[in-house]
Amino acid sequence: MATSVKLAEHDKQRLDRLQGELTARHGRKVAQQDLMSWLLDLGEAEKARYSRDALRPMTSQEITALRHLAVRTGSRTREEDIDATVARNAK
C-alpha cells in the first residue's frame, strides 16, 4: 500500500538528486519508493552505531570542530536557556 509523504522542497530536491545519481550509476531508473526503502533500511542498520556515538565522550578534535561551528551573534545564551528550549521542543 503506497502512502504519500510530505517533504520540504529542499529535501525533495535532495531526494531527486540522489535518485538521479543512482540512476546514472546503475544505468536504470531507481524508483523513489525503492530509494526510500533503501534509506530506511540504512537508517535502521546504523541506528545502533548512532546511539553508541551519542553516548561516548567527544574527543578534543571533535570539540574543537564543534566550537568552530559557533556563530557570534552578539547575544549571550545561558546553558539553562538552551536546556529549557531543548526540553520544550522535545515534547
Image (cartoon, rainbow, N blue to C red):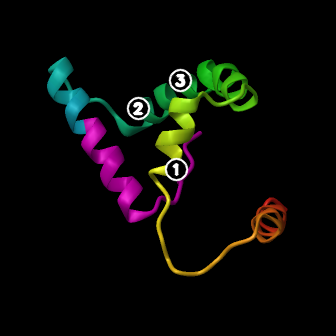
Mark 1 or 3, which is nearer the eye? 1
79 shown above or below 38: below
Residue 77 percent coordinates (x, y) = 68, 73
Tags 2 and 3 touching, CB below 8 Å: no
Q: Distance between the residues labelled 1 and 3?
A: 29 Å
Hey, what amino acid is under mark 1? Arg
Q: Residues within 10 Å of mark 2 (few under 14, many from 20)?
A: some
**Position of residue 21 in the picture relative to residue 36 (left or right):** left
Q: Where is residue 58 in the image (x, y as percent from the top left)?
A: 64, 31
Kind of element beneath mark 2:
helix
Binning the other alpha carbons within 10 Å of mark 3 as few (below 14), some (14 to 19) or many (20 upward) gives few
N-terminal-most mark, 2 or 1: 2
On screen, residue 57 versus residue 28, left or right, reads right
Q: Name the residue under label 3.
A: 42
Numbered disc total = 3
Identity, as a three-letter code, of the amino acid under mark 3: Leu
Q: Do the residues labelled 1 and 3 touch (CB within 8 Å)?
A: no
**Numbered disc in front, either 2 or 3:** 3
**Foreground residue, 27 or 70?**
70
Asked whether 26 falls inside the magenta stretch, the response is no
Kind of residue indicated by mark 2: Leu
Percent x, y of residue 24:
15, 27
Q: Which of marks 1 and 3 is nearer the N terminus?
A: 3
Give the residue number, with chain letter if any, for mark 2: 35
Where disc 3 sits, the SS reads helix
Residue in front for this viewpoint, 68 or 27: 68
Where's the N terminus, which quadrant?
top right
Q: What stretch is highlighted in magenta?
A: 1-19
Q: Residue at x 64, y 77 (%)?
A: 76
Q: How far apart are marks 2 and 1 (CA)?
A: 35 Å
Which residue is at 71% across, 22% downward?
A: 52
Task: Report the residue marked by disc 1.
Answer: 67
